[in-house]
Amino acid sequence: MAKKGQTYFCEICRQKVVVDKEGFGVLVCCGQEMRLVGVKGMMATWTTVHHKPEGGVKFVCNICGQEIDVIVETTGILECCGQRMQRKEANVS
Ligand SMILES: [Zn+2]
Ligand SMILES: [Zn+2]
């Protein structure tokens, strides 16, 4: 299960997301499970950033309530709990 602050990426389209709110669903992109990026190594800087990316996009699962921030956005389809996640702009004021 995804934990808040964890970074996941898609091996196929290279889309990268950070979990903003935990859910019980499994994050899927391009039809396969997204890979958890370790907090150590070259990706460490991603998880130490506290503020949301400028103009960031957020995706929400309507079933388990999981929310993710997209760091690297691609055309890959993000899914959770077997359905497409709902896109919403993160910095709507
Ligand atoms: Zn879900
Ligand atoms: Zn993908």
Image (cartoon, grey):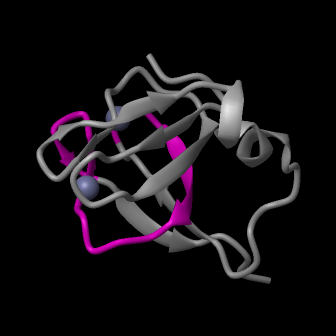
Magenta segment: 63-84
Q: Position of residue 13 (x, y in %)?
A: 26, 60
For the N terminus, the quadrant is top left
Q: Nearer the viewer, residue 42 or 84?
A: 42
Residue 16, percent across and down? 47, 53
Give residue 17's position: percent from left, percent from top.
52, 50
Q: Considering only vertical position in the picture, is 90 above or below 30?
A: below
Task: Say whether residue 66 is magenta.
Answer: yes
Name the foreground residue: 90 vs 16. 16
Does residue 91 appear in the picture of this structure?
yes
Looking at the image, in which quadrant does ligand 2 appear? Answer: bottom left
Quadrant placement of the C terminus: bottom right
Residue displayed at 53% across by 61% down: 70
Q: Residue 57 in the image: state x and y as whole percent.
A: 56, 71
**Is 10 placed left or right of 39 in the picture?**
left
Q: Residue furthest top?
A: 1
Q: Residue at x 41, y 20 (%)?
A: 24
Q: Nearer the viewer, residue 80 or 43?
A: 43
View extreme (front): residue? 42
Instruction: Please indicate whether residue 91 sits to the left or right of residue 37 in the image.
Output: right
Left or right: where 27 falls relative to 83 = right
